[in-house]
Image (spheres, rainbow, N blue to C red):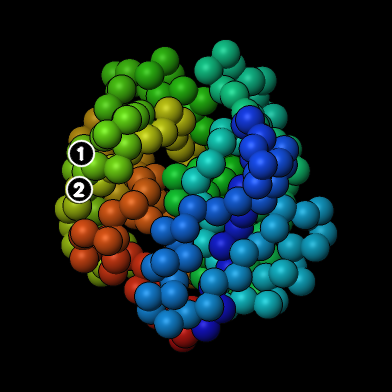
């Protein structure tokens, strides 16, 4: 199978090999795809009208993490804590998500990709959990050595796609300051942290799944997080 993975773009300092707006992708995604004998296809950030043709080339799509989504896409003005959005990247991945659903191909959204699925289909975000979410949780934005560590538990709704991979409870890593607010009409929350922050969504068609954490950094040592990818690959093969 061919697994499409949407690229991000370099919005930071350029170097010799990564110039401004260069397309880039964490190697851990390529590693988990190739470990299971599938072909990774990197989908570059191009004009949104090209998305349907790119999606036709693959059997499933992963939308990884990255920078904040422009809040104008959910009818809000940017707050001070919202930074680094890039409109073309947002529009391209919105188009990829919608094209995949139209073509009946599964999508796995991770962190930003999870948030993007919600916005793409009509939901909104908390622009900054510590200042907006009830209770002001701060555990979710882990940096440094904790960025790849399992730092809290999430409860998973039984009988869901996610529970078939992870069971009804799992430890997750966490490095995000935004989260889902209004849930898109075609999605429903299937996992939460103890503080009430939504941690995963699915749709009724079985095509869309999004998680707030970063399983690409956990699958190497956590077999349940690897199952999140392998069950996704199996859905693409149905």
Q: Looking at the image, which residue is at 17% across and 53% down?
A: 169
Q: Residue 12: give x, y in percent of width and height.
A: 62, 31
Residue 230, image quadrant: bottom left
Residue 164 falls left or right of residue 83:
left
Secondary structure of the residue carrying tag 2 is strand
Q: Extreme front residue here?
A: 16
Residue underneath mark 1? 152
Q: Are marks 1 and 2 in contact (CB under 8 Å)?
A: yes
Is 23 or 140 nearer to us in this picture? Answer: 23
Residue 23 shows in this picture: yes
- Packing grade of label 1 (10 A; few <14, some 14-19, many >=20) is some
How far is disc 1 from disc 2 in space, using C-alphas? 6 Å
Instruction: Estimate the x, y position of residue 37 in percent, counting from the top left.
Output: 43, 82
Q: Quadrant of residue 193?
A: top left
Seen at 33% across and 18% down, the residue is 136
Q: Which mark is residue 162?
A: none
Q: Residue furthest bottom?
A: 238
- The residue to which callout 2 is attached is 171
Q: Position of residue 187 (x, y in %)?
A: 48, 53
Horizontal and vertical percent for residue 216? Answer: 38, 56
Q: Is residue 187 above or below residue 20?
A: below
Q: Residues within 10 Å of mark 2 (few under 14, many from 20)?
A: some
Does residue 185 appear in the picture of this structure? no
Q: Nearer the viewer, residue 89 or 238?
A: 89
Q: How many marks?
A: 2
Q: Residue placed at 48% from the left, 28% from the top? A: 126
**Residue occupying the point 38% across, 79% down:** 36
Circle 1 SS class: strand
Q: Sequence-wise, which precedes: disc 1 or disc 2?
A: 1
């Amino acid at each position: 199978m061919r697994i499409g993975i949407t690229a991000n773009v370099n919005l930071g300092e350029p170097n010799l090999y990564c110039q401004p707006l260069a397309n880039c992708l964490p190697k851990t995604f390529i590693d988990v795809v190739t470990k299971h004998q599938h072909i990774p296809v990197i989908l570059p950030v191009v004009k949104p009208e090209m998305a349907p043709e790119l999606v036709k080339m693959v059997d499933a799509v992963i939308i990884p993490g990255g920078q904040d989504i422009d809040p104008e896409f959910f009818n809000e003005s940017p707050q001070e804590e919202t930074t680094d959005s890039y409109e073309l990247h947002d529009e391209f991945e919105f188009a990829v998500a919608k094209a995949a659903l139209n073509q009946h191909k599964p999508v796995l959204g991770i962190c930003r990709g999870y948030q993007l699925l919600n916005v793409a289909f009509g939901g909104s975000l908390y622009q900054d959990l510590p200042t907006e979410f009830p209770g002001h949780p701060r555990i979710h934005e882990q940096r440094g050595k904790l960025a790849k560590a399992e730092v809290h538990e999430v409860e998973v709704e039984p009988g869901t796609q996610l529970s078939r991979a992870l069971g009804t409870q799992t430890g997750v890593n966490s490095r995000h300051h935004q989260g889902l607010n209004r849930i898109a009409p075609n999605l429903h929350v299937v996992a939460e942290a103890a503080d009430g922050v939504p941690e995963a969504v699915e749709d009724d068609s079985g095509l869309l799944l999004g998680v707030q954490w970063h399983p690409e950094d956990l699958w190497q040592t956590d077999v349940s997080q690897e199952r999140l990818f392998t069950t996704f690959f199996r859905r693409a093969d149905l």
